[in-house]
Image (cartoon, helix red, strand yellow):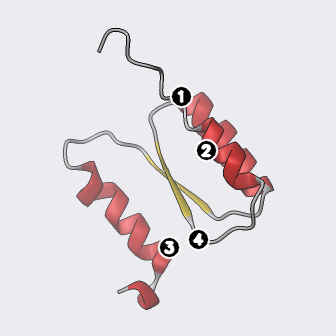
Amino acid sequence: MAGAPDPGTGLDVADFLSLHPPLCPVILHTSNSDGRLAMQNRLRAGGWTVATVLPREAAWIQASWLPVARKLIGPRGM
């Protein structure tokens, strides 16, 4: 959309979270490889558990994101 503000790359969120104690796992879902590595490094340096999902296929949430979320949450979240 023309004139819409740039929402950023997610690095601003990773920077914010990295300054706070880890509360839960984080799933990075981006195809931006440079940004993903920077976000991953900053979050891990802050003690956060980080997983990455690449949104490639049409049903990527069910096919890729959901299995990772279930693994990270474990049986307590089911």
Q: Amino acid at mark 2?
A: Val
Is the residue 22 above or below the residue 74 in the image? above
What residue is disc 3 on?
72
Q: Amino acid at mark 3?
A: Leu
What residue is disc 4 on?
24
Is the residue 64 above or below the residue 41 in the image? below
- In the rendered image, the quadrant that contains the C terminus is bottom left
Q: Residues within 10 Å of mark 3 (few under 14, many from 20)?
A: some
Give the foreground label among 3 and 4: 4
Q: Earlier in the sequence, mark 4 or mark 1?
A: 1
Q: CA distance from mark 2 to mark 1?
A: 9 Å
Question: Which residue sits at x=74%, y=53%?
Answer: 18
Q: Nearer the viewer, residue 3 or 41?
A: 3
- Image position, residue 57 (x, y; %): 24, 42
Q: Residues within 10 Å of mark 4 (few under 14, many from 20)?
A: few
Residue 6 placement, left or right of 4: right
